[in-house]
Amino acid sequence: MIRIHTIQRSVVVIALAAWASVAVAVVPARAVQPVSTVLGAGAVTQAGQTQQNSQPQGQTPQAGPAGEKPPRAGGRPRPQNPPGTGAEPAGGAEPEQGGAQQDGAGEEPTPQIDAQAQAAAAKAEARATAAAQARAAAEAQAAADAAAVAAELEARAAAMARQQQAAAERMAEAEAAWEVAIARDRTLAFTRSTARKAIEELQAGFGDEFERSAALYALGATDAVDQLGLLEGTAQAGSGFEQLAAILALGELSLPPVDLLLRLLADPRNEVRGAVVLALMRTDDDRANAQIEPIALGRGPLGRLVSDLIVFVRKPEESVPSAPASLLLSLRWEAAKRYGLVDGRTWRAARIAALEEDKVFLDSVLLPAAASGRWPSIRDHLVAMLIEEPSLAVYEACLEALPAEFNLLVRNGIWTPSSPEQWQELVLALERRGGSPELIDIYDRATGVTSLRVRAAALLLVAGDPRGWDTLAPLLASDVPARRQLVAVAMGRSGDRSWISELVRLERDKDPDVRATALAARIALGELLALDIAESIIADQTNEDRPFLARALVEVAEDGRVQRLLEQALVFAESPLSIEVAVALAEQGRLSARPILREALERREAPSLQPRIVRALAGYADQGDLIRLREMFPSDGNAALDLELARALVLGRDGLGLRLVRAGVWTRDFHRSVLAGHLLADFQGIQALYEELKSPPPRVSAADLRRIGFVLGELGGVGEVENLARRRTSADPVLQGAYLGALAARTY
């Protein structure tokens, strides 16, 4: 009976263990109870038998005698001695592990079964914990995936919004440009001399394809019927812009060849058919209209184009841009600029007059030139302009005329840029001048502007201040080659030979521009070994680094040996590199490079380099150069080129340049006017100011005359005042201004 009873209890234990494992799988890990707790307070014996639990199934075990605790959850059950033996452990202490236990009532404990149950429970608990962790990881991954998808969707939405915004801005710009073109077209006119000038240029073969196209259109715009054969031949057998211009020109004639145009309407090329349709519309011929109206009623791109062109011809201000209409407006504008009139004047005269009224343009041309003048009062006027109306031109002039004083103004807080935009312009002016020790305080202040910190640090390093290195050093590990290149350039311009070892390391850079810049920087620091290496690279026709090195050597062209290397580079360099090399050589006075630059100007090659070409030629310009530069001025909207052309003409004392100086003399702004007067006196003597007083511009005021008198007194002093007083009364504004100018000059 005991064995049967023990087997039954073992079955119950195994069943309960299985139940516990299932229960653990669906219950959180912290809620799992040991099997011993589930079975009750009965002890498990080594023989595989357990004592009968005195608690009914499902009830919580009760505490034993006073001081005895119920079994601990998850712990080893307390051993129980048979009642009445007096063998309970003293103080309720548990027997040591593996110690002998007393069995009572003839039952043998079964510790092996209890250990198996606990092991099964532990495994179940571990599986539950792993499952919970897996679920938590899956939930975390799902959340991360959802966040990534949301971020991607947000990025796509932002990108789409930016694209839509950019498209809207481009559309708005196109519409604004179209409105400007329509309005501008109303100011154009053509004269009898238009056709003659156009024919002369066509016969001379002058200009590029579009300029010849404008000349062809000018023949039609002036009804040059004697050139009908040229226009018809080009319309039928020409190509590109010239063919389209000839077609449009035929539509401008008083007796247009409608039959020829109708035949050209069958051309399969869309651009030709578009030009023909527009030309036929502008003839207002009944046969042409009869052919065009059905096309406008049809479907497809051509039908929509014809509908748009009808609006353009009848109501231009309500039209939308189209290829044929845009071409027509462009040809009319180019033809009027070159051979006709704009606002009743030649385009050149109108453009020069507009530039004479442009204060920003005049400042950029005249202030840097005036800053190098010999009059000490120039500095006072520049400081006044710096405080009252700072600009890029004022910064450049101050850096030229009073660099040390400018640095003191900034260091002592008397003047500092008041906005990030002013800081941006100031740093640009500093970079154009190059690093200088006398401007270190300005560089240091500029490092406090986040967007300019790196550029200002480079200027500090060039000026010999090691504080710039803390900002530049991390850039050597940058993934952007231009940043590593910037550091190399700064080290090379610093004059500090201690940077050579760092430059040698940069010569192992993976980027060829960085390698070449590092080698050029070593040359700038006077290392002869680096110059020998450069000579070997330039002489090696198989070396792929040759063009990169040639571009880098442009920055250190002051060295005579480098100039010889650059002359060798002209043999293999292609445009635009060849032009960059020629510019560097011309700036150093090498006459061999000047023909290359003149030819590039004539061909209008490398438009982005045109201002640099002009600046290089202006340094040693002869009379032929000045004539060519005068013919080029002004350009059609290239502000940088106009600036360099005007500066060249002013420094060359060309008549057109002196006209700009005189325009500055009569400007309404006091300091600008006085500085322009100083410049005019530098060029032509103080007598030139008297000549200005003899022939002042229309509607001159007393204040204008008083400014001219101020310049005379400031430059001529008391002697000039006495000279004026002999011929003018005290009420004369010129004499009044001369008194004030003489008093101002007494401070020097």
Image (tube, rainbow, N blue to C red):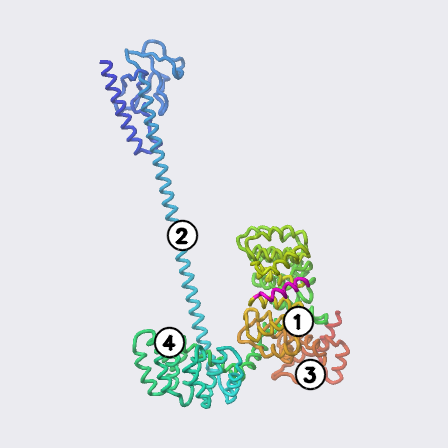
Residue at the disc numbered 2: 151
- Residue 504 shown in magenta: no
**Circle 4: element type:** loop
**Circle 2: element type:** helix
How far apart are the two marked residues, 2 and 3, measured between alpha carbons? 72 Å
How far apart are the two marked residues, 4 and 2, measured between alpha carbons? 48 Å
| Picture coordinates of residue 512, whole percent (x, y) | 56, 56
Residue at the disc numbered 4: 269
Q: Quadrant of residue 294?
A: bottom left
Local crowd at mark 4 within 10 Å, few (<14), some, or many (≥20)? few
**Circle 3: element type:** helix
Q: Amino acid at mark 4?
A: Arg
Above or below 604: residue 564? above
Give the main secondary structure, helix, strand or loop, of the magenta stretch. helix
Residue at the disc numbered 3: 691
How far apart are the two marked residues, 4 and 1, measured between alpha carbons? 50 Å
Camera-near label (3 vs 4) is 4
* Mark 2 or mark 3: whose residue is earlier in sequence: 2
Seen as rendered, the residue at the extreme top is 85
For the C terminus, the image quarter is bottom right
* Residue at (70, 62) in percent of width and height: 404
Above or below 381: residue 191? below
* Mark 4 or mark 1: whose residue is earlier in sequence: 4
- Residue 568 shown in magenta: yes
| Picture coordinates of residue 594, whole percent (x, y) | 63, 72
* Mark 1 or mark 3: whose residue is earlier in sequence: 1
**Circle 1: element type:** helix
Q: Amino acid at mark 3?
A: Glu
The reply to whether the C-beta atoms of the residues labelled 4 and 1 are less than 8 Å apart is no
* Mark 4 or mark 2: whose residue is earlier in sequence: 2
